[in-house]
Amino acid sequence: MLNVQKLRGDFPTINGQNIYFDSVASSLTPMVVVDSIIEYYTKYRANVHRGNYDLSMQASEKFEGAVMKIAKLINASLEEIVITSNTTHAINEVALTLDFKEGDEILLSSLEHSSNLIPWLRLQKKVGIKTKWYNPGKLGLFDLNEFEKMLTPKTKLVTLTFVSNVLGSVVPVEEVGKLCKARGILFLVDAAQAVPHFKIDVKKIGCDFLAFSSHKMLGPTGLGVLYIKKEHAENMMPAFLGGGTINTAECHCLSLDSCDIDACTFSELPYKWLAGTPPISETIATGVAIDYLTGIGYDNIHEHTANLMSRAMKGLTSIKNVDIYGPLKAEQRNSIVSFNVGDLPPSEVGRILNEEFQISVRAGDHCAVNYFKDVQAEGTAPGNVRASFYVYNTEEEVDRLLNAVEKISKLTV
Ligand code: PMP
């Protein structure tokens, strides 16, 4: 069982009456993670993999230890981990690296975050690929049979968010992985909202790529992860090249003029994919965040947030004028409630919650404009109000949200 009151003491920004319900955008960070960043800058500040002196070797050792923890967290090997700056960067790296040809199809869903959409639209314009949309409707429930019908011999890539950042609905990624594997289709999983909540196993999912961000799972900003299945990591030419990615000791070029990139020997994995100086303190701090997260345990996280979720859903469904988006069964949604109150614009509800009730929620389209275009009436400002829960939130905080929404709902009658 999670001792939430004790755990809250680990988070320096939890104080006073303010309630933080925007962990989907970015989680709070425990002090041990902040301390590890301070420790790097004050005790062993040096670059990694560059120097054969003590400070650099100490930094390298801590850095590599943290990358190992990242790999273990998702059941990948060290060679399959590419350090990026966030999920968005990770997905762009795949989009820039894969070879597409005109007519290739990419299948995604209307629940995708812009980060898993715009990079593909760019390829649509540049290369002439076709993006196809699976629409899970207002409830956001995934129908595998309907989805399967949209796969064609031209589908080169399926790219899906594991947990929707708008609804908290969950995609059956293992089943999708099987469909893709049987057809030789590449599969990318946007796990930005999944890694903070679920034990991920890339082998079980059977994906080729998986992306997530540390700042949503108690870690620092500035650190993203791209998992690339080993065979692709070995065979693909990374979009970003430079210092550290090429094995210069094995280069036989007499000058750069005569250098042929195809004849280059890349550094061993995963350094082939690590162009330039990586985010060192952020990677080390991510290792500490992983220790903290796994110390709590995914089962405890799930039990706690599922309890908050069902309390919130029970309360919200009983308030008149509240229109809930996404699955109505609490167990079908992960840590997110998403709703509108009467005809009040979501931004107004967000403003009142902040100014009158000291509750931080997100109001707007949550970077998923296509979903709202599909499910809201034309002319409506796209979006809703989203409250998201994590390990440090309490039942009392959920009750304060419900009381506040009830009061706001009376403004609309
Ligand atoms: N995908 C999903 C599902 C997200 O929720 C987010 C962040 N809201 C992103 C991608 C982008 O993450 P980041 O800003 O860390 O790149």
Image: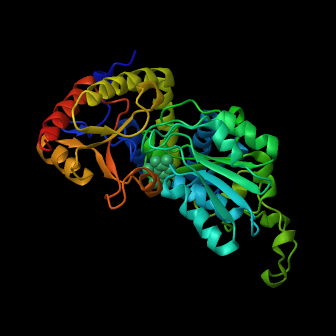
**Residue 378 visible in the picture:** yes
Q: Residue furthest top?
A: 1
Image vertical order of residue 264 relative to residue 108, above or below: below
Image vertical order of residue 327 relative to residue 360, above or below: above
Specify the color scheme. Answer: rainbow
Q: Position of residue 271 (x, y in %)?
A: 70, 55
**Left or right of residue 47, residue 4 in this image:** left
**Left or right of residue 242, residue 344 in this image:** left
Q: Residue furthest bottom?
A: 257
Image vertical order of residue 362 relative to residue 237, above or below: above
Q: Position of residue 37 (x, y in %)?
A: 42, 47
Image vertical order of residue 234 relative to residue 302, above or below: below
> Which quarter of the rendering shows the C terminus?
top left
* Tag count: 0
Q: Position of residue 97 (x, y in %)?
A: 70, 63
Q: Position of residue 119 (x, y in %)?
A: 58, 63
**Residue 202 visible in the picture:** no
**Left or right of residue 392, residue 272 in this image:** right
> Which quarter of the rendering shows the N terminus?
top left
Identify the residue at image location x=19%, y=39%: 18
**Left or right of residue 22, residue 199 in this image:** right
* Residue closest to the eye, 354 or 245: 354
